[in-house]
């Protein structure tokens, strides 16, 4: 069973920017269009917890920081 298209229209990143999410049905993930965090979909339920997300700003910090503009 896939996520309901109406649900996908209203889902947003839980971070303060609340950007839209792109759904990948093969990987069962939602990816933030702004920060790049990847949220899993488990048993057709999106897990929109920042602590459980992969990638994004926290992952950049762990790798030594994202590239910054002078």
Image (cartoon, rainbow, N blue to C red):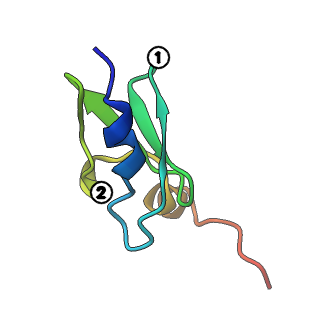
- The relative height of residue 29 versus residue 69 in the rendered view (above or below) is above
Residue 43 picture quarter: top left
Residue that label 1 marks: 26
- The relative height of residue 54 versus residue 19 in the rendered view (above or below) is above
Q: Residue furthest right?
A: 70
Image position of 69 (left or right of 65): right
Q: Position of residue 2 (x, y in %)?
A: 33, 20
68 vs 42, nearest the viewer: 42
Q: Residue furthest front?
A: 6
Residue that label 2 marks: 50
Q: Position of residue 45 (x, y in %)?
A: 21, 32
Image position of 54 (left or right of 45): right
Residue at 49% over, 55% down: 56
Mark 2 element type: helix
Numbered circle sitting on residue 38: none
Q: Which quadrant, please, contains the N terminus?
A: top left
Q: CA distance from mark 2 to mark 1?
A: 22 Å
Residue at 31% over, 30% down: 4
Answer few, some or many: residues within 10 Å of disc 1's Cα (few below 14, many 20 plus, some between 14 and 19). few
Q: Which quadrant, please, contains the C terminus?
A: bottom right
Mark 1 element type: loop
| Mark 2 vs 1: CB contact within 8 A | no
Q: Position of residue 13 (x, y in %)?
A: 39, 57
Residue at 32% over, 61% down: 14
Answer few, some or many: residues within 10 Å of disc 2's Cα (few below 14, many 20 plus, some between 14 and 19). some
Q: Position of residue 62 (x, y in %)?
A: 47, 58
Q: Count of labels shown?
A: 2
Residue 8 picture quarter: top left
Give the mark nearest the N terminus, 2 or 1: 1
- The relative height of residue 39 versus residue 24 in the rendered view (above or below) is below
Residue 60 picture quarter: bottom right
- The relative height of residue 66 versus residue 28 in the rendered view (above or below) is below
């Amino acid at each position: 069973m896939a996520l309901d298209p109406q649900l996908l229209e209203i889902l947003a990143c839980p971070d303060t920017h609340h950007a839209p999410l792109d759904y990948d049905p093969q990987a069962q993930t939602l990816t933030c269009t702004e920060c790049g965090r990847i949220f899993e979909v488990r048993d057709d339920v999106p897990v929109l917890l920042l602590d459980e997300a992969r990638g994004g700003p926290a992952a950049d910090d762990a790798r030594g920081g994202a590239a910054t503009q002078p």
